[in-house]
Image (cartoon, rainbow, N blue to C red):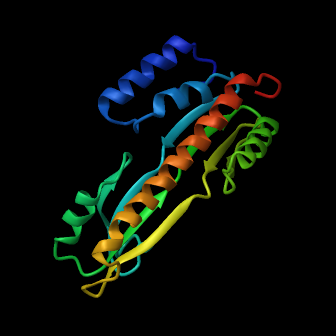
Amino acid sequence: MSAGNSTSSIEAILVEERLIGYLDPGAEEVLLKLNKPAKLETTSSCMGRVSIVEGEWHWMRDEARIVYKTHDTLTLDEVERVLSRPFTDLWLKASGPIIHLKSSSIECAHSLIQLARIHGFKHSGIISAQRGGHAVVELMSSLEMSLPLRVRNRDIIREESLVEVVELANRIVNLGRRRLYSLAEVVSSLQECF
């Protein structure tokens, strides 16, 4: 999307991206609000997700792979289905939203980051800056959980505790979304820097 697009053209782009399957559930409303100020343009978005990763260490990209992922609510049945498969090591990960935006000025990027941090996006920052003052901002939630489910073929979480683990993962994703909705509401109402 390009900055300065009219609301109707942004809506058309979002409808197309939803139909293709690019948008997470609930993303359209947030992206419309974040794209409202003329000096901001979203470039990518993740509304938060829960995933199950196979591998000894979930952060080792070359040695781990995602075997289940949802941007919606996780269910106990889905976790049990993955646990029934012959994986040696499994991790459950829940994370809050990550949004990337282009800003037409460094000053606006700084203002956006300050606002984001107030709303719980503590790991936000400028990830690139270009001549002419343009900047790319990453809004990243501090909400996350990584929990081993299985280590060396041994289940770590007792079956009776899986319900609480699933609920916790869903709470993390839902809290991140509520924070993002709150931030987007404020951003769409400001005109000073944006």
Identify the residue at horizontal 42%, vertical 52% (top origin).
49
Determine whether 119 is above or below 87 in the image.
Answer: above
Identify the residue at horizontal 51%, vertical 55% (top origin).
172
Residue sticking out furthest to the left: 85
**Residue 168 horizontal/vertical position (percent):** 46, 61
In-image side of 146 versus 127 (left or right)? left
Identify the residue at horizontal 71%, vertical 30% (top origin).
186
In-image side of 96 versus 52 (left or right)? right
**Residue 79 horizontal/vertical position (percent):** 27, 63
**Residue 140 horizontal/vertical position (percent):** 61, 52
Residue sticking out furthest to the front: 160
Task: Please tell me which residue lies in front, 5 or 128.
Answer: 5
Determine whether 14 is above or below 102 in the image.
Answer: above
Identify the residue at horizontal 24%, vertical 58% (top origin).
78
Q: Quadrant of the C terminus?
A: top right
In-image side of 118 versus 139 (left or right)? right
Any part of residue 97 in sight: no
In-image side of 58 versus 34 (left or right)? left
**Residue 71 horizontal/vertical position (percent):** 38, 47
Any part of residue 150 in sight: yes
Task: Please tell me which residue lies in front, 133 or 54.
Answer: 54
How many numbered markers are drawn? 0
